[in-house]
């Protein structure tokens, strides 16, 4: 394996090239394929005639669904972030899900119980919801479509001390900046990485801030395993 690419929109900031060179080889080729419109994206078969594996990021995680076969995880979620060839087939997997499950398991092991609020209702929110369901964890979903003053929302009333450590999972894109209130003992897990609008603002307000880089690195690890496996997942 030596040539890969990321399909997305406005992805010049992506750290994927350096991550995959670290995971696979310093000499690996990794291209950023930035498409303003979904109509500009080549077919999955065309892309995989040029690359050994494809990553997909927002807003195109549902773009290839009609062209490919899905793993069990990806089928339940209805979105993929990795593609590979498997014989005559193209398989789509969601390694975001695998990374999120890992991290949630660790959080539960370290903190016993979590009281979870998920910000956002897009694709990544759905991934979280499926992970929570399969781990038999409960959560509340809040979105700008249904919540007034979503940027400045006061989350204190959504948490109950008897339910566990308050955990906010932010699945919203980088244009969303949370400036509201939340319990001082809460955790804030941001799916964005290197995002000072949150990390600096929340640092002294809460118990712990989790940058999204850990999840990004874990999903990349699972992507390499997925690409390396010659059988269907």
Image (cartoon, rainbow, N blue to C red):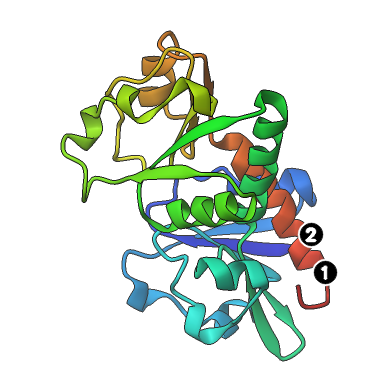
Q: Is residue 83 above or below residue 96?
A: below
Distance in Å between CA atoms under marks 2 and 1: 6 Å
Disc 1 crowd rating (10 Å Cα; few below 14, some 14-19, many 20+) is few
Q: Is residue 82 above or below residue 111?
A: below
* Residue at disc 1, secondary structure: loop
**Residue 15, image x, y percentages:** 56, 42
**Residue 33, image x, y percentages:** 48, 63
User: In front: 151, or 195?
Assistant: 151
* Residue at disc 2, secondary structure: helix
**Residue 198, image x, y percentages:** 39, 24
Which part of the image, by quadrant, shows the C terminus? bottom right
Q: Is residue 135 left or right of residue 78?
A: right
Q: Is residue 177 above or below residue 9?
A: above
**Residue 148, image x, y percentages:** 16, 39
Question: How many labels sit on residues?
Answer: 2
In this rendering, does residue 83 appear at all?
no
User: In front: 24, or 57?
Assistant: 57
The outermost residue toward the top is 204
- Asked if the residues shown at circle 2 and circle 1 are in contact, with their CB atoms under 8 angstroms apart, the answer is yes
Task: Tell me the residue at 47%/79% (across/down).
Answer: 42
The outermost residue toward the bottom is 88
The residue tagged 1 is 229
In this rendering, does residue 202 appear at all?
yes
The residue tagged 2 is 225
Q: Is residue 80 above or below residue 193?
A: below
Task: Tell me the residue at 53%/65% (across/down).
Answer: 77
Task: Tell me the residue at 59%/84% (across/down).
Answer: 45
User: In front: 70, or 213?
Assistant: 70
């Amino acid at each position: 394996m030596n040539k890969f690419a990321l399909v997305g929109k406005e992805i010049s900031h992506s750290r994927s090239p350096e991550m995959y060179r670290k995971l696979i080889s310093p000499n690996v080729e990794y291209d950023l394929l930035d498409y303003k419109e979904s109509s500009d994206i080549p077919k999955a078969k065309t892309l995989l005639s040029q690359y050994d594996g494809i990553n997909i990021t927002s807003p195109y995680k549902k773009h290839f669904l009609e062209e490919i076969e899905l793993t069990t995880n990806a089928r339940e979620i209805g979105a993929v972030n990795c593609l590979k060839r498997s014989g005559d087939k193209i398989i789509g997997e969601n390694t975001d899900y695998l990374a999120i499950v890992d991290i949630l398991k660790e959080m539960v092991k370290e903190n016993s119980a979590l009281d979870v609020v998920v910000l956002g209702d897009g694709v990544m929110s759905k991934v979280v919801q499926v992970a929570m369901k399969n781990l038999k964890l409960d959560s509340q979903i809040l979105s700008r479509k249904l919540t007034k003053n979503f940027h400045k929302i006061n989350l204190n009333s959504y948490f109950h001390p008897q339910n566990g450590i308050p955990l906010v999972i932010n699945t919203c894109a980088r244009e969303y900046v949370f400036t509201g209130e939340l319990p001082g003992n809460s955790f804030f897990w941001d799916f964005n990485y290197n995002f000072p609008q949150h990390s600096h603002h929340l640092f002294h307000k809460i118990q712990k801030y989790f940058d999204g880089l850990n999840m990004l690195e874990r999903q990349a690890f699972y992507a390499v395993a997925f690409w390396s496996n010659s059988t269907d997942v």
